[in-house]
Image (tube, rainbow, N blue to C red):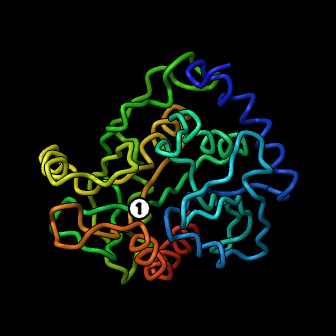
Amino acid sequence: MTDSAGERWGKEAADAAAAVVRARLEVQAPVAAIILGSGLGDVASRMVGARSLAYSEVPGFSGTAVVGHAGTVICGSLGGREVVALAGRFHMYEGYSAQAAAFPVRVMHALGIRVLFASNAAGALNPELVPGDLVVIDDQINLTSQNPLTGRVTPGDLRFPDMSAAYSPRLKALVMAAAGAVPLKTGVYVGSMGPTYETPAEVRMLAGLGADLTGMSTVAEAIVAAALGMEFVGVSLVTNAATGMSDTLLSHDDVVEVGQLASARFADLLEEFVARL
């Protein structure tokens, strides 16, 4: 079996993984799944009655070696509602295919979840965005050169999903309403393969394409969510200005540090969002 055939990461595999997660974490009827990006894993500490399972114990999952990604599935109550959180991602730059990177989305769908909230750390292409900003993603540009739907159609998928509203207008409005006094901005996210940060020339190109934020995740997840008919929303934490927009050299340690500093604000937003679902 190959990734391109869609079988290794398809419906049967997702059902099998979901069965393990459901049994081990006593999952009942979660209202949402949450993907936690770099440095934002502390949200899990807000979950009441949290039960966790290492990725290595879930069929089809692997441990993540990226700093700031714990590599655990967590089930518990947030904002008085049951949720499942994914603390960490599989990134394509680690050698995973787009199908593998988006496989957790299929597992969440197999658990009966139809709302997916994804967060990520991102670099600012728009000079009006500064480190520490929380940005609701309006739309995306996929420049990873991969699409997780390549190959045979997975049962339950749309062959040609519409992407005109891949980021749910309803969920975006809920996030904005949940923000309260927390200032939120909006922007277009461009996903690239990584693992290098962009060159100054690439930053100018991406800004010229209409992107406000750049990162190395999320786009494959949004595509699979659209194919499955899930509602998807994304929030980026700006952790740095993109290459060439400041004199500071970029470091993943700085990304994680900014994430930790913003973790409380992000957790407040997320908790209120879940309560409003």
The x and y percentages for residue 194 are 38, 47
The type of residue carrying mark 1 is Val
The residue depicted at 32 percent of the width and 38 percent of the height is 143
Quadrant in which residue 241 is drawn? bottom left
The x and y percentages for residue 4 are 55, 21
Residue at numbered disc 1: 235
Q: Is residue 272 above or below residue 58?
A: below
The residue depicted at 43 percent of the width and 72 percent of the height is 253
- At mark 1, the secondary structure is strand
Please tell me how crowded label 1 is: few (under 14), some (14-19), or many (20+) other residues with Cα within 10 Å.
Answer: many
Quadrant in which residue 153 is drawn? top right
The residue depicted at 22 percent of the width and 69 percent of the height is 129
Q: Left or right of 256: which side holds 55? A: right
Looking at the figure, which quarter contains the N terminus?
A: top right
Q: Left or right of 161: which side holds 204? A: left
The x and y percentages for residue 150 are 49, 22
Q: Left or right of 127: which side holds 43? A: right
Q: Is residue 61 above or below residue 244?
A: above
Q: In this view, does 76 lie above or below 106?
A: below
Q: Left or right of 221: which side holds 50? A: right
Looking at the figure, which quarter contains the C terminus?
A: bottom right
The residue depicted at 70 percent of the width and 57 percent of the height is 30
The x and y percentages for residue 184 are 32, 72
Number of callouts in the render?
1
